[in-house]
Amino acid sequence: MENFNEIKAIWQQQQQELPPVKEVLQKIKKYKRTAIVKAYVVLLALVLSLIIMLLVLVNTPFKLWTSYVGAILVCITIIYMFLFKYNTLTKKRNEGLMSNNAYLKKLKQDIVDGDKNSYKTKLFGMCIWGVAYAFFIYEIVYTSTQYMVIGYAVLIIFWVVLWFVYRPYKVKKYQEKIQRFIQKIEAIH
Amino acid sequence: MNFNQLYTAYSPKIYRVCLGYLNDIDLAKDIMQETFITAWENLQMFRGDAKIETWIYRIATNKCLRQLQYEKRERTADLPFHIPDEHQEVYKEDDRVLLLRQCIAELKEIDRLIISLYLEELSQQKIADIVGMSHENVRIRVHRIKEKLGKKIKANGKF
């Protein structure tokens, strides 16, 4: 078309006031610092939690073996969460290696896998916490029927809410989210 | 090519491509800067300058496509043409530039990217490499997009 060169000229004349390279480099430094803090503060919190739990395990003279099992399960959960978080953080993205179509396919897969994994990990973590709690509190409550009923009733309510309320709600939410996103991706081809 | 050279050479082009896709000046600047952050993080992987253009455009276009995930960011293509943009006051942009951007914004996502890259005078082979299509497919798409754009622009009678 004859006026397409004119269109090109109009396109190229678009005004822009872009930041100078020094400003961009400063932003990069700031971004790096923020990313490191954000990434590692959670890991640090998990490491500290593990240290505290290990100190409790070593220094507290529990009377019953159930407390030791509970404490060990807590430690296992912390390690599990640490590894999951660390794995997520160290996945490096280089969008420059993928074409747009390949990137869209990966994005689609990431959101399906990522949300599923995140939700399953959290659910698994909560279940283990529940079991750890059950073992841990036994030593505290076994001498009193009243405390035992209250303690384990709280645990049962927690599990019921987790399984029959939280889990279906999260499944429904993530399925809706991925469906909307997949529809968007498929609509653009 | 070092980072300074990369930024100087490509920032206006990347910005225009982002603007073509997003039709939002502030968002385009954000995405442009994010592109160069990613480029800075991965620049050491490159040994030769031959593929750097494809690489930097891929980063930018993939970051644009990532906006699909963010539902709250609405396209501005549906707004009436004559609503003045505050940036129009600051930059005194030509009405024809605004019309062109709006017409591009009404295209499908991949078409927006293709035409923006084409307007940046990238070869169809390079566009094909960036988008992940065959050269033939890109050639046909470019032809169709040019026709569509031409009709939209003529309908407004501003050119």
Image: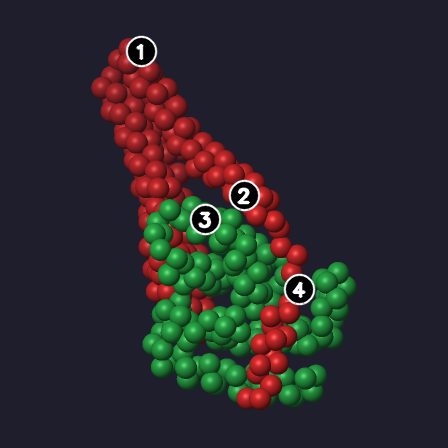
Report the residue marked by disc 4: A15
Residue contact between numbered discs 3 and 2, judged by CB atoms under 8 Å: no
Mark 2 or 1 closer to N-term? 2
Q: Amino acid at mark 1?
A: Asn
Distance from label 4 to label 1 (Cα)? Answer: 68 Å
Callout 1 crowding tier (Cα within 10 Å): few <14, some 14–19, many ≥20: few
Callout 3 crowding tier (Cα within 10 Å): few <14, some 14–19, many ≥20: few
SS label for mark 2: helix
Report the residue marked by disc 2: A25
Q: Amino acid at mark 3?
A: Asn
| Residue at mark 4 shares a chain with residue at mark 1 | yes
Which residue is nearer to you in this view: A65 or A184? A184
Q: Which mark is residue B7?
A: none
| Residue at mark 3 shares a chain with residue at mark 2 | no
Report the residue marked by disc 1: A59
Q: Amino acid at mark 2?
A: Leu
Which residue is nearer to you in this view: A60 or B61? B61
Residue B31, image quadrant:
bottom right
Mark 2 or 4 closer to N-term? 4
Chain at tag 2: A
| Chain with colour green in the figure | B
Distance from label 2 to label 1 (Cα)? Answer: 50 Å
| Residue at mark 2 shares a chain with residue at mark 1 | yes
Instruction: Tell me the quadrant of the picture where the N terminus of chain A can be found.
Output: bottom right
Who's the residue at 34% across and 38% down the image?
A86
Distance from label 3 to label 2 (Cα)? Answer: 13 Å
